[in-house]
Amino acid sequence: MNRRTFLRSTCLAVAAAGLGVCPLGTARAQDQAPDGAAPPGAGLSIEDERFVRPAMFYDRLEGGIVRCRLCPRQCEVAPGGRGACGVRMNRQGEYMTLVYGRVTALNNDPIEKKPFYHVVPGSMVLSLSTAGCNLSCKFCQNWQLSQFRPEKVEARYIEPQTLVALALKNDIPNLAFTYNEPTVFYEFMHETARLGHEAGLRCTVVSNGFTSLEAQRKLVPFLKAYKVDLKAFTDDFYRDYCHGRLKPVLETLENLVGLGVWVEIVNLVIPAANDREADVTAMARWIKTHLGPDVPIHFTRFRPMYKLQNVPPTPVADLERCCEAAKAEGLRYVYLGNVPGHPGGDTFCPRCGRLLIQRTGMWAVENHMDAGRCPRCRAAIPGVWS
């Protein structure tokens, strides 16, 4: 999806829901500086103090330096500097978030778009983002939001209580922190999730999983579901394509499952990059051993974008091969994504094979579930169904 299509579709969807908020603009790709310096563009001033709040999870060191504990990078930031995410600043020895309430996109999505396939199928979710990310993936689909400093992405100030009120007023039962990496706007997310949970909304996170266990533990009590992009099963891929590491993401997955929040995994399959069958098999084996066979995994189709414009779309046959490899390792809920109409996007009972949920694109068009069970054999299907 290009920038214009992204903005137009988001604005239309939000307008249709009567929410009156949409992405206000993004910086241009050719303006992006490789070192994260702010490119020329029209954003909101970083001096706008509405967006600035004390950060959580950091230590004060000598000389006014702070060490951030929010994610595995553990950035040490001198006065006047920012962390690798670009949205947290050291102000005279005090660490501050620059994106509290700084909403860059607000959308009314089907829950399947996140994708969550085992979270109240067919329901809608109020989805929101700020700016910035703690990874720099070459294939990022929302790079217009994630790969710029916040002052270069147009935004609107919206308080957590206003977002919760919007969802309730428009009968939207779910909230999702998504599009850019929610970890980097943790303080805003935490308060919004807390208020949303208290109001009876189902709060969800769509994340790269590159976040600290400490931060996860403090957030999970307010969440119903957490989707993690497991981008590959090799450290080389994380280093070369994302400027990150694999181990912390695996630790995140184990921690989330241990804390009892519903988890789904997405693996974007990129030709000649992370599609080796041996790696897919190893990933599936790890998931079954460490997380259990009922954690859904979505193998989704890559399409050329951002810095991987010359890589072709994933052949559907390769996605099918990945799905079969995961099923052969004993995973019960394996999905094929970004191929509208493919039966690999449907949910079947692993015991009797009955079609439970049929999907077309991002929509659940048939739902035969009966109170979280297969209507034929009465097998319990794990998920969040009500």
Image (cartoon, rainbow, N blue to C red):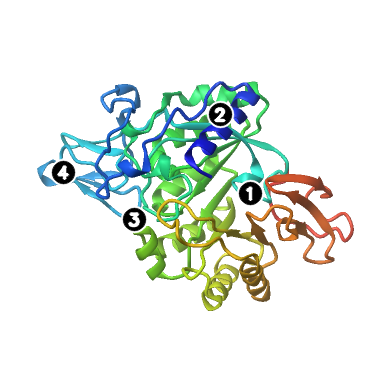
Question: Looking at numbered disc 4 in the image, what kind of residue is underneath it?
Answer: Ala
Amino acid carrying label 1: it is Phe
The answer to whether 45 appears left or right of 281 in the picture is left
Q: Return the residue nearer the eye: 374 or 32.
A: 32
Q: Is residue 363 above or below residue 237?
A: above
Q: In the rendered structure, which disc, 3 or 2, sits on the residue that comes first in sequence?
A: 2
Q: Name the residue located 58 percent from the left edge and 53 percent from the top edge.
A: 260
User: Please, is residue 107 above or below residue 240 in the view?
Assistant: above
Residue at disc 4, secondary structure: loop
Q: Position of residue 77 (x, y in %)?
A: 20, 45
Q: Residues within 10 Å of mark 2 (few under 14, many from 20)?
A: many
Whether the residues at callouts 4 and 2 have beta carbons within 8 Å, the answer is no
Asked if residue 199 can be seen in this view, the reply is no
**What amino acid type should be assigned to the residue bearing mark 2?**
Cys
Residue 383 position within the rendered picture, expressed as x and y whole percent measured from the top left: 69, 52
Q: Which residue is mark 3?
A: 72
Nearest to N terminus: mark 1 or mark 2: 2
Q: Which residue was labeled with disc 4?
A: 78
Instruction: Point out which mark residue 11 bears.
Output: 2
Q: CA distance from mark 4 to mark 2?
A: 39 Å
**Alpha carbons under labels 3 and 4: distance apart:** 18 Å
C-alpha gap between disc 1 and disc 4: 40 Å
Measured along the vertical axis of the image, is residue 212 above or below residue 48? below
Residue position for label 1: 116
Mark in the foreground, 1 or 2: 2
**Amino acid type, residue under disc 3 in the picture:** Pro
Q: At 63% across and 71% down in the image, what residue appears?
A: 326
Q: Residues within 10 Å of mark 3 (few under 14, many from 20)?
A: some
